Image (tube, grey):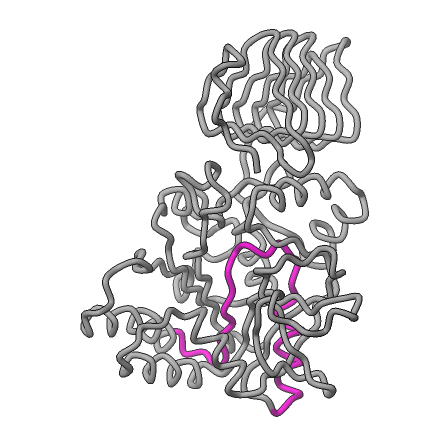
Amino acid sequence: MRKGEIAAIIDLNEDVHDLLPLTAHRPIGTLPFASRYRLLDFPLSAITNADIHSVGLFMPESERSVQDHLRSGAAWNLDLIQGGVFLFPYVATRDYTDPALRERYYENYTQFLRRSGSKYTVVMGAKNVANVDLNAILAYHKASEASITAVYKKVPRARIQPNDWTLSLSEQGAASSVMRAADRTDEAEETVPAFMEIYLLPTIDLIDLLETAAQTAEFRRLPQLMREAVLAQNANAFEYTGYLARIDSIPRYFAANMEMLQEVNYQSLLFSSIPILTKSKNEVPSFFSKESVVTNSLLGTGAYIEGTVEDSVMFRNVVVHRGASVTHSVVMQGSKISTGSTVRYAILDKGVVIGPNLTIEGTPEAPVVIGKNRTVFRSSELEGDAHA
């Protein structure tokens, strides 16, 4: 790819409702994943691998965690003199009955696209965990006559939920529309083309699309415009074949982290030809006492383990005291599990403290979720806590 040939738009205004309380103070893009990553790392790493130098990051309402994680963009080689990451403020829920505000929404995108000087633009979000080769998508796009390319993966029907976006494919493999899974009529098919909400198209076409939308009375956000463009233009469809997890609910977030404990998924996602980059932390190694038992788990740096950890994903600086047990759980940065306590099928957000001799237990389909910085010393304090 020639330098500057492609620009990227990452839209972080994604629905967080079904991931509460984990998304009470962070967007989907900064949810921790697989003991050391954030979901935003996956699109950023794809962009770095494709040598893209102009990235427009359209911020969510809770943007502080994005800025803290991104910093200068150096972890993804985006701290450039020319180009780099451009941050645009949160605008998703303003009152767009005012024509001036509607025009400003679209202008943010068109201003970035014109200044990028790119021939093509890729549009993506952060809730699809995948290791995507944007160079391959661009080459596929150039080889076709379609004006837009949409990315999908064939997924077993059992993994598809009614509200998921899917592609309707023609016999020639073109994408004729984007539809909810509940609206499909091909129940006999064993797999469904799950839409990854990744688009690639000429920059000038995207600018035209945005400018046309700015002149209409009905306000439509960029994701809706892109879905309509697939229907209107009979898009090219690129099939992605690697690991994919869609993070839009607590059960799916929990399941995706648990899938990282399977070697084939871990290697496919994180150690393929495209490395997944993240902000580095220089910390001490994890400590394991002689009495500790740790099996089939991922642990971040700085952990202090005296108890038992099985089939779990733990982030940095987690403490598991003597006699405590953590199994089939996701434990985020700085959490502590005290002596004699059992945590099973649970998600503990950052800074959670579990007191001694307690049992925290959910199920694989409905893990217990304890929100950020909670301190739990009695079972009664868990009443009303979220089950997925």
Residue at screen point 74% across, 56% down: 158
Q: Quadrant of residue 24?
A: top left
On the rendered structure, is 247 left or right of 18?
Answer: right
Q: Position of residue 362 (x, y in %)?
A: 64, 28
Q: Is residue 31 above or below residue 58?
A: above
On the rendered structure, is 171 left or right of 382?
Answer: right
Residue at screen point 47% across, 57% down: 78
Q: Position of residue 278 (x, y in %)?
A: 56, 46
Q: Quadrant of residue 129?
A: bottom right
Q: From the image, which quarter does the N terminus lie in? A: bottom right
Inspect the magenta stretch and tell me whether residue 117 lies in it: yes
- The magenta-colored residue range is 116-145
Q: Is residue 301 above or below residue 241?
A: above
Q: Quadrant of residue 81?
A: bottom left
Residue at screen point 37% across, 61% down: 86
Inspect the magenta stretch and tell me whether residue 185 lies in it: no
On the rendered structure, is 127 left or right of 190?
Answer: left
All told, the count of numbered labels is 0
Residue at screen point 51% across, 27% down: 370
Q: Position of residue 112 (x, y in %)?
A: 35, 71
Q: Is residue 180 above or below residue 114?
A: above
Q: From the image, which quarter does the C terminus lie in? A: top right
